[in-house]
Image: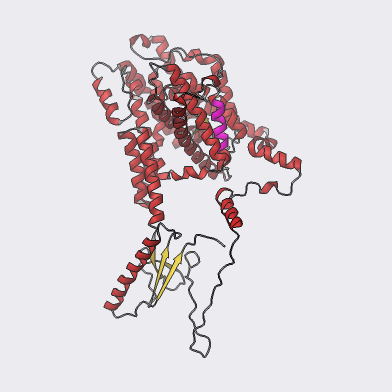
């Protein structure tokens, strides 16, 4: 059968004035050379997009330029750059800078690191990405989910309060190997591996992580001094309510609630009127300024309001010598780096593709992986932790009218000026405002509409979504991630070993055949059974397919006997062939 059209079968029609059937025989294709067949399969698997097609029939100088442009896309779009494009990038860069500075400080604390490392991670990585990345809209920096995941995995190995130096070194080591993982996947064109983590599993994982992050912020939101290091909802709530009578600070709660309401109202205004996109973008920085000034003039820090305190001035120091390249922590750094790098990669590529689709341009997933990996490798050597594409900042970048990756450069320059001159001003910034900013930032990660849509489309996908979600909030981030990956793999195996099969019937007054369960009006062909198998036949599913077809034949024969219809004489099977000749 061609696609979903009329099935093809052996032509049993009789020639004119004879009763002898005329059979059309299809010859067996010529035997393929083993090497050629292998090379064809290899090319279709890893180089299906033919990345070297532009290099054909080009001069050596042209090939060198094309090679340079493939690694550094800035040499391609940079030649077309103009003042009008810069105006859009300048506005977008300044807007996302106002959003990233307060977020970076909060995300670094979420990862268990000093706030300055959040700012460092929004200075160097965006610069590297601007030269190597192919997305025009993605905004680079620390993100909530990766910060939580990294902090959780790091704290499982080292206590940051008792061994802060080793904790920091392990963070840089994990960042280095996160970058190496990303570069490796991109260079060897293994990006399809991240597709094994299904969209449904990602939706559930992100939603669970968002709730976990919000619960973790209750320490700063309520002014609690002693707080659990665990991430499960039971441990967090127990820690919150056990300190309710003596551990909560009413001044901190007043600051937190007031500014969270302010941030939510600003976000609502921005959604209602797209032209006012800048209001929710600048609201976090404005909240930091106002709350810092309020704490300074009232000296609320003397009344139990926790503040950021000292924040070092200056640009990123070198951290190459701090990375573990040997010893006990090397393997731990590799393990943490691979996990956090894969999650960061999944988020960044998904964001890049979604915004590229909106502007109708293409991004090369493998090049993106190399760019993201390179920026994290370089970042690990310049006191940065894992950075990736931020959905909230990318959305603001898109709405603000960014034209190219120059908006990331503008943001980096603003962060640089902040590191050089403005960091002392954050001394009296209350932790409560950082908690409110993070809670406001992670709310969009809880995508209820996507979960409802998944439930309507595929119940098994919904199980994967809910498994990842409940695994994160009731157990831990690692358990939720394992459940997400496990269910995704289980679904793939189930689809391979138990492919979908359907009995087809003919739609009245057409030559189209469809699944009779989906189209009740479709009628079966008397004396024939038409079956479609929605998968190639492998050793793992051949027995299932044969038994399924045999059962249908037996059931159908019993039905036709009961109503005195013609017996089944023909079995037509539409099958997805494994090989293409």
Model colouring:
secondary structure
Let me know if residue 539 is in the magenta part. Answer: no
Figure label count? 0
Q: Residue furthest bottom?
A: 17
**Percent position of residue 358, x then y:** 53, 44
Q: Looking at the image, which residue is at 57% across and 27% down?
A: 378
**Percent position of residue 304, x then y:** 33, 12
Query: Majority secondary structure of the magenta segment?
Result: helix
- Please state which of residues 384 and 172 is positioned toward the viewer in this rendering: 172
Q: Is residue 9 above or below residue 355?
A: below
Residue 554 appears in the rendering: yes
Residue 239: quarter of image:
top left
Q: What stretch is highlighted in magenta?
A: 369-379
Residue 399 appears in the rendering: no
Can you say which quadrant of the picture contains the C terminus? Answer: bottom right
Q: Is residue 66 above or below residue 145?
A: below
Q: Looking at the image, which residue is at 53% across and 86% down?
A: 15
- Please state which of residues 355 and 143 is positioned toward the viewer in this rendering: 143
Residue 154 is left or right of residue 409, and the answer is left
Q: In this view, does 562 lie above or below 365?
A: below
**Percent position of residue 152, x then y:** 39, 28
Q: Is residue 315 above or below residue 534?
A: above
Let me know if residue 373 is in the magenta part. Answer: yes
Q: Looking at the image, which residue is at 50% across and 85% down?
A: 14
């Amino acid at each position: 059968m061609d696609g979903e059209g009329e099935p093809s079968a052996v032509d049993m029609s009789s020639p004119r004035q004879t009763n002898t059937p005329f059979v059309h025989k299809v010859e067996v294709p010529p035997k393929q050379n083993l090497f050629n067949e292998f090379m064809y399969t290899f090319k279709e698997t890893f180089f299906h997009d033919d990345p070297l097609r532009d290099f054909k029939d080009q001069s050596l100088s042209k090939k060198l330029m094309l090679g340079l442009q493939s690694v550094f896309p800035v040499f391609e779009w940079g030649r077309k750059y103009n003042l009008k494009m810069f105006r859009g990038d300048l506005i977008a860069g300044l807007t996302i800078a106002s959003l990233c500075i307060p977020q970076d400080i909060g995300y670094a604390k979420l990862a268990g690191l000093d706030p300055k490392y959040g700012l460092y991670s929004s200075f160097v990585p965006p610069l590297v990405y601007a030269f190597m990345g192919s997305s025009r809209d993605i905004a680079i920096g620390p993100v909530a989910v990766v910060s939580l995941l990294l902090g959780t995995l790091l704290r499982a190995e080292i206590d940051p309060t008792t061994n802060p130096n080793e904790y920091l070194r392990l963070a840089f080591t994990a960042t280095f190997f996160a970058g190496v993982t990303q570069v490796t996947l991109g260079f060897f064109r293994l990006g399809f591996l991240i597709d094994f983590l299904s969209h449904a599993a990602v939706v559930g994982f992100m939603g669970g992580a968002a709730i976990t992050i919000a619960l973790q912020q209750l320490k700063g939101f309520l002014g609690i001094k002693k707080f659990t290091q665990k991430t499960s909802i039971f441990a967090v709530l127990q820690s919150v309510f056990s300190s309710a009578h003596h551990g909560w600070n009413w001044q901190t709660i007043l600051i937190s609630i007031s500014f969270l309401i302010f941030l939510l109202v600003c976000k609502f205004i921005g959604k209602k009127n797209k032209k006012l996109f800048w209001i929710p973008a600048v609201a976090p920085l404005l909240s930091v300024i106002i709350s810092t000034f309020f704490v300074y003039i009232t000296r609320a820090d003397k009344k139990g309001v926790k503040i950021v305190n000292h924040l070092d001035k200056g640009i990123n120091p070198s951290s190459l010598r701090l990375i573990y390249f040997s010893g006990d922590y090397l393997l731990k750094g590799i393990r943490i780096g691979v996990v956090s790098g894969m999650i960061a990669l999944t988020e960044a590529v998904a964001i890049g593709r979604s915004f590229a689709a909106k502007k109708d341009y293409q991004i090369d997933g493998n090049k993106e992986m190399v760019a993201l990996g390179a920026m994290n490798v370089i970042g690990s050597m310049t006191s940065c932790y894992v950075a990736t594409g931020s959905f909230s900042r990318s959305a603001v970048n898109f709405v603000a009218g960014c034209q190219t990756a120059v908006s990331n450069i503008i943001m980096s320059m603003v962060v640089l000026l902040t590191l050089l001159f403005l960091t002392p001003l954050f001394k009296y910034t209350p932790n409560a405002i950082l908690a409110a900013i993070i809670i406001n930032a992670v709310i969009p990660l809880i995508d209820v509409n996507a979960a409802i849509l998944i439930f309507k489309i595929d119940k098994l996908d919904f199980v994967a979504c809910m498994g990842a979600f409940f695994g994160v909030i009731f157990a831990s981030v690692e358990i939720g991630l394992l459940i997400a990956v496990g269910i995704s793999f289980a679904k793939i195996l189930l689809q391979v070993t138990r492919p979908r099969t359907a009995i087809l019937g003919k739609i009245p007054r057409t030559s189209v055949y469809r699944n009779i369960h989906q189209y009740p009006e479709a009628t079966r062909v008397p004396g024939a059974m038409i079956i479609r198998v929605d998968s190639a036949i492998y050793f793992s599913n051949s027995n299932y397919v044969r038994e399924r077809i045999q059962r249908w034949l037996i059931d159908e024969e019993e039905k036709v006997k009961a109503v005195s219809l013609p017996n089944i004489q023909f079995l037509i099977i539409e099958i997805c062939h494994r090989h293409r000749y």
